[in-house]
Image (cartoon, rainbow, N blue to C red):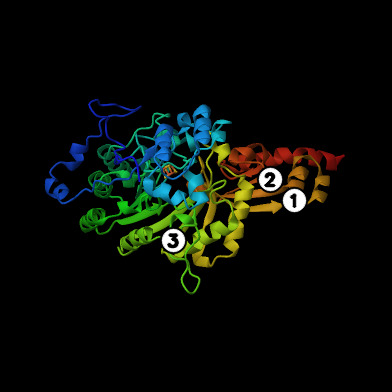
Amino acid sequence: MPLDSKPIRADAPRKGKKTLIAGSRPKKKAVSRRHKDNLYGQIEETKFRRYIVHDLPRYRQYVEEGGAEIYSPAELDELEKAGVSDRLPPRATGYYLDLAKRSTAVRNLIKARPEEMDDLSGESDPSNQLKYSPTPGLLHKYELVLLYVVRACSSWCRYCYRSDFLTGKTGKDTASIHEIAEYIKGHNAKVESGEITDKPKIREGLLSGGDPMVLSNRNLFDYMNGLAEAGVEVIRIGTKELAFFPQRFDDRFFAMLDLFHELHPHVLVSFMVHFTHPDEFLKLDADGQVVRDGHGRALRNPVVEKSIKRLRSRPFVTLENQTPIIDSVNDDADTLLVLQQEMKRLGVNNHYFFQCREIEGHRAFAIPVERAWKLHAQSQAGLSGIERSRFALSTEAGKTELVSVIEGDERLRAIGGELGDALADGLVVFRLHRTPHEDRQNDLIIARRNPEALWITGYEDRILYDGRKPDTESKWGALLAALGPALMQAAE
Ligand code: SF4
């Protein structure tokens, strides 16, 4: 197969010239590795050949050379004209492109769409993350901190909610583990001494990016070891590499992981994996049909299955799946049902399904919030208690679960005013599943339905009760305003 032979070096400077991307600065890696030659000497690297096809000119060459026909020449012309690469260049590994030949869903996940450029409304910095970044490369909202550790994934999902970081548009930088470890130790000391009272101790660290699994083993170890030495109890690794390039989980990676465990036996390592569709891990025949055993049970893609089994064989490792619900990729209830059943059967817990974030260009990928909720709810009906998951929006207020959509009753419009309209149109009920504000945990947001809404912003002018607000008066403020006309009418 004629493919790009360059292995990924996402964080490497270009040959002959040190190119600094927006916000780049020295990471003081040597400080974290000081006096640890013996340790780092034990970590071996593999030079992976991911055969990444990156951006439209390379896709054109790839298709001409007989690669998977992801795009026709006319489609490539159209995409170039639309300028999709300015938003996010299309990118995929040879492995994933091969899978895309047999699965429309997989193809749609990485295939650029001209309509991405039709409406670029959306947030340049989704969920206002920079507001929660006390030091470059770090987000600190909860007892968990998130670290941006690398500016690439081996393939790029078109709906990527970190595209601003991958393309460097918002100036976010990668984290220096030396700085982050100092921050964590300082914060935790202040919590213990009582100097900080509005935030808990930092117990968890989530390595994110981009995909930490595109880092070398030594670079990945830097972050894991640094967090563990700073006192973190749980290290999460957010990765889609089990779908994009499962061969990354090789002997040398597991040797590094086991070495880490030997050094830090009390630290849990949780892989936050990202499977969007069952075709990413089930065994498909040449026509894209799932291969089954004599009892009708789906067989698994052997490379993915082997990597997952090796991860699961470590008692200090857990696996949790989370993914958005995306137009033309996984937006049907049966797909979501099978995804959850098969994940659990592989030993991967079903964590969250997310609404597609309000990134720039999201209108090409997002389905309405209430439709996504409905699909998720339908999928839950066919699942046992241990297979279930939550549907949530990752908003500035935290993980906001959509718990119910209540059908309205036209007769209630007679009440009049905004309240009558709300009860006639129906209500949506969100729950603050995870919020940085201790006093608002599990509080609700209740709003009039908006079947067209693609994000919580589509409900902001319809809210009747807002549990995100700090006090009772402001929580009920919108309902009191809505009740005004109805009360006045009743008094007449
Ligand atoms: S794996 Fe995650 S960070 Fe990478 S492109 Fe997909 S959504 Fe973005």
Residue nearer the viewer, 96 or 209? 96
* Inter-mark Cα distance, 1 to 3: 44 Å
Q: Are marks 1 and 2 in contact (CB under 8 Å)?
A: yes
Report whether residue 193 is seen.
Answer: no
Kindly identify the residue that appears in the image at 28 percent across and 29 percent down. Answer: 25
Please give the residue where the numbered disc 1 appears in the rendered image: 408
Determine the secondary structure under disc 2. Answer: loop
* Inter-mark Cα distance, 1 to 2: 9 Å
Q: What residue type is labelled 3?
A: Lys
Q: Are marks 3 and 2 in contact (CB under 8 Å)?
A: no
Please give the residue where the numbered disc 3 appears in the rendered image: 283
Ligand 1 image position (quadrant)? top left
Q: Residue 449 carries which label?
A: 2
- Label 1 near ligand 1 (CB < 8 Å): no
Residue nearer the viewer, 150 or 95? 95
Kindly identify the residue that appears in the image at 78 percent across and 44 percent down. Answer: 420
Q: What residue type is labelled 1?
A: Gly
